[in-house]
Amino acid sequence: MTDPLQRFEADRPHLRAVAYRMLGSLSDADDAVQEAWLRLQRSDVDGVANLTGWLTTVVGRVCLDILRSRAARREEPLELHLPDPVIVADNGVEPEHAAVLADSVGLALLVVLETLAPAERLAFVLHDLFGVPFDEVGRLVGRSSDAAKMMASRARHRVRGEAPKPDADPGRHRAVVDAFLAASRGGDFDALVALLDPDVVLRAESAGRGVETVRGGAEVAGRALLYSRFSTASVERVLVNGTAGLLSVQDGRPAGLLAVTVVNGLIVEIDVIADPERLARLL
């Protein structure tokens, strides 16, 4: 049998991908994986036939504890918070991000996952995204297999109803992003509206101000023209969770990130993070 600690290192990218989808935070995901490592060192796994499955459920249990702790600390509903994006240069994916981006999990999906109850999120992520049996999911949340199925079903319904499925063609997506940049820089309101779905949603997060949400093609186009950081700063093309995006850079430091979700050639969601300190931690 392969040494368990060697197997853990081989499984680390997979475990990080599980934790990232569960938590929406890269730093918390790393903490959860590290906790799984510590639990592995304290456990006798000689009789474990599927160590990857065992580690996956351990990470799931750790993540569930973190999600429940987050919920317990909230005295009132938490304001919308954009999950951590995975940002890489648009010229290749760095190895440590490969598993996280393997199925191009988008910010649109992660935003919806943030609205789920902890047990529902675990049931959906572990079963629907990673194939963990409902019997095991039920044990993790202290419920029956049938109850786990119901939780996953509720989460699945929410995801299907609220998380748009992006176009699969990366070239088409990149062309839309480039056209958005050109229209913004040129102050072309009509061209911007033509790129936007009539029901487009813009979520913009800035340091200390939470997330502002704007809806509708004309409203979002007008707001886009105000984002001078994407028209006057240096702009780099990046991949944001596997799809084309834009990173603005001022004085050699990241100033803002723009990520879009494109469906049928139109932008249906725009996520903007204008928090230089947060972006510096993510890059």
Image: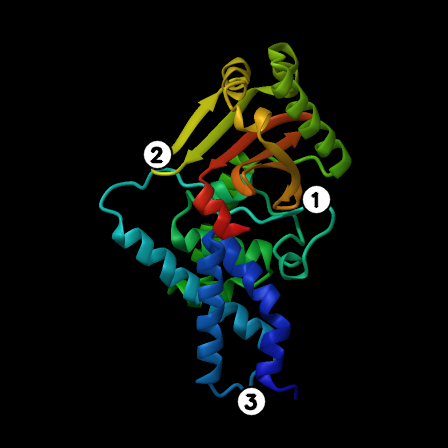
Three-letter code for the amino acid on which mark 1 is drawn: Asp
Q: Residues within 10 Å of mark 2 (few under 14, many from 20)?
A: few
Q: Earlier in the sequence, mark 2 or mark 3?
A: 3
Residue 154: tell me if it is visible: no
Which residue is at the front of the view, 273 or 200? 273
- In this rendering, is residue 9 above or below 170? below
Closer to the chain start, of discs 1 and 3, is: 3
**Residue on which disc 1 sits:** 90
Front disc: 2 or 3: 2
Helix, strand or loop at label 2? It is loop
Number of dots carrying numbers: 3
**Residue extending furthest front?**
251
Cα separation between marks 2 and 3: 51 Å
Rendered location of residue 212, percent (x, y) = 40, 29
Mark 2 in CB contact with mark 3 (< 8 angstroms)? no
Rendered image quadrant of residue 129: bottom right
Give the answer, above or below, for where 221 lies relative to 99: above
Foreground residue among 75 and 135: 75
**In front here: 253 or 219?**
253
Q: Position of residue 79 (x, y in %)?
A: 34, 38
Horizontal and vertical percent position of residue 13: 61, 65
Q: CA distance from mark 1 to mark 3?
A: 43 Å
* Element at label 3: loop
Q: Identify residue type, mark 3.
A: Asp
Say which mark, if any, is on residue 46.
3
Seen in the picture, residue 76 relative to 19 is either above or below; the reply is above
Q: Please give the residue where the numbered disc 2 appears in the rendered image.
A: 209
In primary-sequence order, the first of circles 2 and 1 is 1
Q: Quadrant of residue 210?
A: top left
Position of 228 compared to 89: left or right? left
